[in-house]
Image: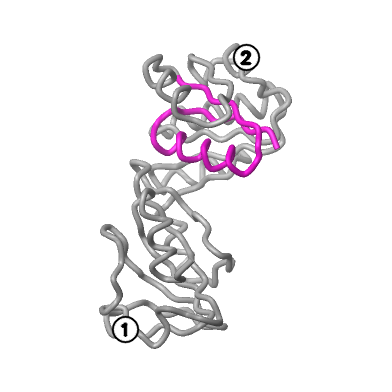
Amino acid sequence: MFIVVNGGGKVASYLARHLIERGHDVALIEKRAAVAEKLASELPRHPLIIIGDGCDVSFQEDAGVSHADVFAAVTGDDDDNLVSCQLAKTAFGVPRAVARVNNPKNEHIFNALGIEAISSTTIIARMIEEESTIGDIRTLATLRKGNMAVVEIELPTDRCVVCDKRVADLKLPVDCVLFAIVRGEEIMTVHGDTTLQAGDVVMAFTSVEHEATLKRALTGE
């Protein structure tokens, strides 16, 4: 897929890297020249980076929104995210527009305009209330400021290094907190005396830089 990302902060940087590493083509629009230069030096595969305002049709055109599969607005400003997504849909007919929503109260506005609104607050609430999709390890939401994420890790069914151990006794990385477990058809909150079992899907808050360390601590891989 070809994805255009509006924004150049930590959330945008993490999203772009995540997509690029999974083989997608990515372009970014960032109005701050210094931030754009930093992205150019840090991101793999040297993606196209346009210095300009993502709410301006000319900069979206330069980024190739007309042939993008997805337009993702992930700035820290809900108004900018809304306007840029609307522009991508109306001016360029992008098939899918996704926006980071910093204030959950704004979600209904985005949804009413056909824009997929992603609020970390809402996602976490849904994760607690509903069974989540089980995967090996998947970033479900990068939280505000971009340095914390919600992840899910499936414990192996054989050679489980943490099974039958209390959560309080686990040696987890700094800034990592387990908060829920999906076990079969049941979802339970985590306490210090919660005991993990093979096949559990563990949900956790973690700093982005410690995702891999958390996975090793829980799976041994």
Q: Are marks 2 and 1 in contact (CB under 8 Å)?
A: no
Magenta-drawn stretch contains 141? no
Q: Identify which amino acid the numbered label 1 is placed on.
A: Arg
Residue lying at the far top in this picture: please name it.
Answer: 58
Q: Identify which amino acid the numbered label 2 is placed on.
A: Asp
Place of residue 20 in the rendered image (x, y in percent of width and height, measured from the top left) = 59, 37
Which residue is at the front of the view, 161 or 78?
Answer: 161
For marks 2 and 1 on the same chain, the one whose residue lies earlier in the sequence = 2
Which of the 4 image quadrants contains residue 121?
bottom left
Q: For numbered disc 1, what is the local secondary structure?
A: loop
Place of residue 112 in the rendered image (x, y in percent of width and height, measured from the top left) = 59, 43
Mark 2 closeness class: few <14, some 14–19, many ≥20 residues within 10 Å: some
Magenta-drawn stretch contains 10? yes
Which residue matches tag 1? 166
Q: Is residue 220 above or below residue 18?
A: below
Q: CA distance from mark 2 to mark 1?
A: 54 Å
Mark 1 closeness class: few <14, some 14–19, many ≥20 residues within 10 Å: some
Which residue matches tag 2? 62
Q: Is residue 3 left or right of residue 164?
A: right
In front of the other: label 2 or label 1?
Answer: 1
Q: For numbered disc 2, what is the local secondary structure?
A: helix
Which residue is at the front of the view, 113 or 206?
Answer: 206
Place of residue 119 in the rendered image (x, y in percent of width and height, measured from the top left) = 45, 49
Magenta-drawn segment: 1-30
Taking the spot 53% from the left edge, 31% from the top edge, the residue there is: 44
Place of residue 66 in the rendered image (x, y in percent of width and height, measured from the top left) = 71, 23
Which of the 4 image quadrants contains residue 188?
bottom left
Task: Please count the marks in the image.
Answer: 2
Q: Is residue 24 left or right of residue 52?
A: right
Q: Quadrant of the N terminus?
A: top right
Residue lying at the far bottom in this picture: please name it.
Answer: 164
